[in-house]
Image (tube, rainbow, N blue to C red):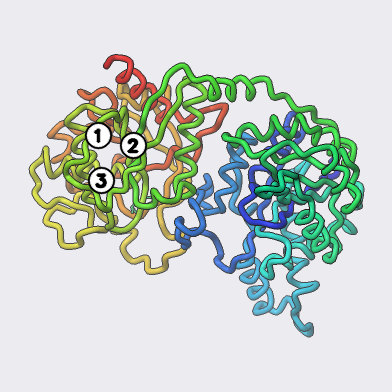
C-alpha cells in the first residue's frame, strides 16, 4: 500500500475566507489520479451541528450514512464528486465524548488524563484510522476557525505533531489569510498575513503554502514580501481571488500553479484536468436565457442556510446555460397582495417551526392554481399536502401536528415509531433512503429510473390514514418507500411541473451531475418563460 500524504489547511486573520472551498478546490485539482479524503475539524462542543441554528452556523449538511455534518462537506462532495462519511467530521464535542468514554472504561487507569497527549492522540488516531480504512492517497484536513482561537488549539497541536509521525516529506501545511487593499491606500497589504503566520509559527506550524485572499491577483511585490517574512518560496504564495462564483476557484488556483507546488512538495503527480469544469463555468458566465425563481423561507436573510439549494440551481444554470435569479420571499410577513408576478418557478425549501407556514401554504396554492412550476423540498412537500388537503380535499383546518397538535385532520404527523423519542440530537429520519418511483410519472422520467436514493432529515411524514383521501382527489404519490407507507414524492400530473419530495435532493447535486429533480424543475421554468 502506498503511503498516505497529508495536506493541512488552516486559516488566519478573519473567519469566512473560504477555507472549505479552498480545501475542496485543491482536492479537485489533485483528484485525477489520487484517492482523496477530506476531514474537517470543528472546535465547538456540540457533537454535530444538527442541533445548531442554521441562521448562526449555516446549513446542516446530511450524508448518506445519516451523519449531520458541517456545510463544508457540501463543498467537498460537490468539488470532489464523492460521498463523504460522518466520521470525517471531527468536532471537539465528539472527541471529548470519546475521551470520557475511554476514561470511564478504564483505558487510562493509573494516568492523569490530559489534553496532551491524550486528546491530541485521539485526534491523530482518528485521522490515521480514516487514512487506513479508506486506503487514502491524500488526506486533506481542514481546521475550522482562525489561528489563535482557543477552541481550535488542540487540533493545531495535533496537526503540528503529525509531521513527526508521518515524516516532513509527506505533509504540507497550507495557511489561508487575508490581503486587504484599504480604502485610500490602493495597495495590497501583507501585514495581517505576516502576523497570522507568526501566530501559526508560535504553535510550531511552519506553512509551506500561503493563500492570500484578495480582491485582485496578488502582485509580484506582495508575494515576495510575504515570501520573505513568512519563509515560503514566492511561487508558494497563491492568490485566493474574490470570485462571483466559487466554482472558479479551482481555475484560479490552477493558474497560480498550486498543483505543481504540491506535486513537488509531496512527491506526487496528479495533473489537473479542468476541461469539462471550465466549459460549465463558461455556461454560467455567458447565459443564453434567464429565469427567476422564488425561494420562500424563514431563514431567507442568510443565504448560507440554503447553500445546497443555491448550489443545485447553479449546477442547473451551468447545464442549461441559463441564469437563475433568486427572489427571496420572507413568508413570515407575507401580505395577501404580493403576487407571484415575474416569477417563473417556486421553491419551498425545508424548515422547522411554525413561523411563516401559512404564507408558504398560500404561495403553494397560487403556484398550483396558476400552474407555476413548483418544487417542494421536505417541509415543502408536507405543506403542499396540507394545502391540497385543505383546498382540494376540503379537510378544513388540515395541518401538520408540528404546527397544530390539535388539528382535526393531521395529514402530516409523527409516525408511531418516532413518537417515543425524547432526545433531539441525531433522532430524525436521517440519511439515504430508497424510494420506488411509479412508472410514467414526472419524477421517474427525470430520474430515468424506478428505484432511487435521496437523503433525508425530518421527523414528520404524510399520515398513512389520509393517503386514500389525497390520492382519491388526484394527488399522485409518485415515489414511496418499498412498503408504500412513507410518501417520498408527490406530483400533480395535470400541471406542467408540480413536484415535491420528502427528501433533500439538493444534498446530492453536483456541478458535473445536477440533481434530476432540480434540473427538471429549472427546465420547466425555462419552458414556461419562453412560451410566455
Ligand atoms: N419540520 C419538518 C419535519 O421535521 C420538515 C423538516 C425539513 O424540512 N427538513 O418533518
Q: Which residue is mark 3?
A: 360
Out of 202 and 425, give the one closest to the viewer.
202
Residue 270 image label: none
Q: Residue at x 20, y 43 (%)?
A: 362
Out of 78 and 338, give the one closest to the viewer.
338
The Cα–Cα distance between marks 2 and 3, rounded to whole angstroms, is 11 Å
Q: Position of residue 217 (x, y in %)?
A: 73, 36
Q: Which residue is mark 1?
A: 340
Sequence-wise first label, 2 or 3 = 2
Q: Nearer the viewer, mark 3 or mark 1?
A: 1
Q: Position of residue 530 (x, y in %)?
A: 33, 15
Give the side of residue 35 with respect to residue 390, left or right: right
Q: Residue at x 19, y 35 (%)?
A: 366
- Secondary structure of the residue carrying numbered label 1: loop
Q: Nearer the viewer, mark 2 or mark 3?
A: 2
Give the side of residue 24 with respect to residue 333, left or right: right
- Do the CB atoms of the residues marked 2 and 1 lie less than 8 Å apart? yes
- Secondary structure of the residue carrying numbered label 3: helix
The Cα–Cα distance between marks 3 and 1, rounded to whole angstroms, is 12 Å
Q: Residues within 10 Å of mark 3 (few under 14, many from 20)?
A: many
Q: Residue at x 53, y 53 (%)?
A: 67
Amino acid at each position: 500500500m502506498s503511503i498516505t500524504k497529508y495536506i493541512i489547511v488552516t486559516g488566519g486573520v478573519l473567519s469566512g475566507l473560504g477555507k472549505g472551498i479552498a480545501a475542496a478546490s485543491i482536492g479537485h485539482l489533485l483528484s485525477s489520479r489520487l484517492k482523496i479524503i477530506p476531514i474537517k475539524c470543528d472546535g465547538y462542543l456540540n457533537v454535530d451541528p444538527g442541533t445548531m441554528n442554521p441562521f448562526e452556523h449555516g446549513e446542516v449538511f446530511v450524508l448518506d450514512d445519516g451523519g449531520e455534518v458541517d456545510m463544508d462537506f457540501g463543498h467537498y462532495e460537490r468539488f470532489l464528486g464523492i460521498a463523504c462519511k460522518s466520521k470525517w467530521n471531527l468536532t471537539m464535542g465528539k472527541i471529548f465524548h470519546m475521551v470520557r468514554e475511554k476514561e470511564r472504561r478504564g483505558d487510562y487507569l493509573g494516568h492523569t488524563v490530559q489534553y496532551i497527549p491524550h486528546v491530541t492522540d485521539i485526534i491523530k488516531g482518528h485521522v490515521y484510522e480514516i487514512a487506513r480504512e479508506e486506503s487514502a492517497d491524500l488526506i486533506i484536513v481542514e481546521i475550522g476557525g482562525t489561528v489563535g482561537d482557543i477552541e481550535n488549539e488542540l487540533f493545531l497541536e495535533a496537526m503540528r505533531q503529525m509531521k513527526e509521525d508521518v515524516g516532513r516529506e509527506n505533509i504540507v501545511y497550507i495557511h489561508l489569510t487575508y490581503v486587504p487593499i484599504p480604502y485610500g491606500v490602493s495597495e495590497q497589504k501583507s501585514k495581517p498575513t505576516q502576523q497570522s503566520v507568526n501566530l501559526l509559527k508560535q504553535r510550531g506550524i511552519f506553512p509551506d503554502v500561503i493563500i492570500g485572499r484578495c480582491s485582485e491577483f496578488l502582485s509580484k511585490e506582495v508575494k515576495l514580501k510575504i515570501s520573505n517574512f513568512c519563509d515560503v518560496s514566492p511561487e508558494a504564495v497563491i492568490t485566493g481571488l474574490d470570485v462571483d462564483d466559487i466554482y472558479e476557484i479551482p481555475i484560479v488556483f490552477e493558474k497560480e500553479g498550486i498543483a505543481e507546488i504540491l506535486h513537488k512538495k509531496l512527491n506526487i503527480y496528479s495533473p489537473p484536468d479542468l476541461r469539462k469544469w471550465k466549459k460549465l463555468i463558461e455556461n454560467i458566465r455567458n447565459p443564453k436565457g434567464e429565469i427567476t425563481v422564488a425561494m420562500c423561507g424563514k431563514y431567507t436573510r442568510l443565504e448560507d442556510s440554503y447553500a445546497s439549494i443555491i448550489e443545485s440551481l447553479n449546477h442547473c444554470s451551468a447545464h442549461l446555460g441559463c441564469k437563475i435569479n433568486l427572489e427571496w420571499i420572507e413568508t413570515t410577513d407575507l401580505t395577501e397582495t404580493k403576487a407571484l408576478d415575474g416569477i417563473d418557478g417556486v421553491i419551498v425549501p425545508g424548515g422547522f417551526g411554525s413561523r411563516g407556514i401559512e404564507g408558504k401554504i398560500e404561495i403553494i396554492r397560487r403556484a398550483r392554481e396558476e400552474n407555476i412550476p413548483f418544487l417542494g423540498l421536505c417541509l415543502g412537500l408536507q405543506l403542499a399536502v396540507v394545502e391540497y388537503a385543505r383546498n382540494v380535499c376540503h379537510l378544513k383546518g388540515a395541518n401538520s401536528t408540528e404546527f397544530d397538535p390539535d388539528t382535526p385532520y393531521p395529514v402530516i404527523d409523527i409516525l408511531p415509531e418516532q413518537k417515543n423519542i425524547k432526545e433531539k440530537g441525531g433522532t430524525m429520519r436521517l440519511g439515504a433512503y430508497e424510494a420506488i418511483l411509479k412508472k410514467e410519472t414526472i419524477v421517474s422520467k427525470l430520474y430515468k429510473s424506478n428505484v432511487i436514493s435521496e437523503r433525508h432529515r425530518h421527523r414528520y411524514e404524510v399520515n398513512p390514514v389520509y393517503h386514500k383521501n389525497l390520492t382519491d382527489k388526484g394527488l399522485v404519490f409518485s415515489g414511496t418507500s418499498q412498503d408504500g407507507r412513507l410518501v417520498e414524492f408527490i406530483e400533480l400530473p395535470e400541471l406542467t411541473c408540480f413536484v415535491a419530495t420528502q427528501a433533500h435532493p439538493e444534498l446530492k447535486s453536483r456541478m458535473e451531475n445536477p440533481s434530476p429533480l432540480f434540473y427538471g424543475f429549472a427546465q420547466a421554468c425555462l419552458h414556461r418563460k419562453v412560451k410566455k
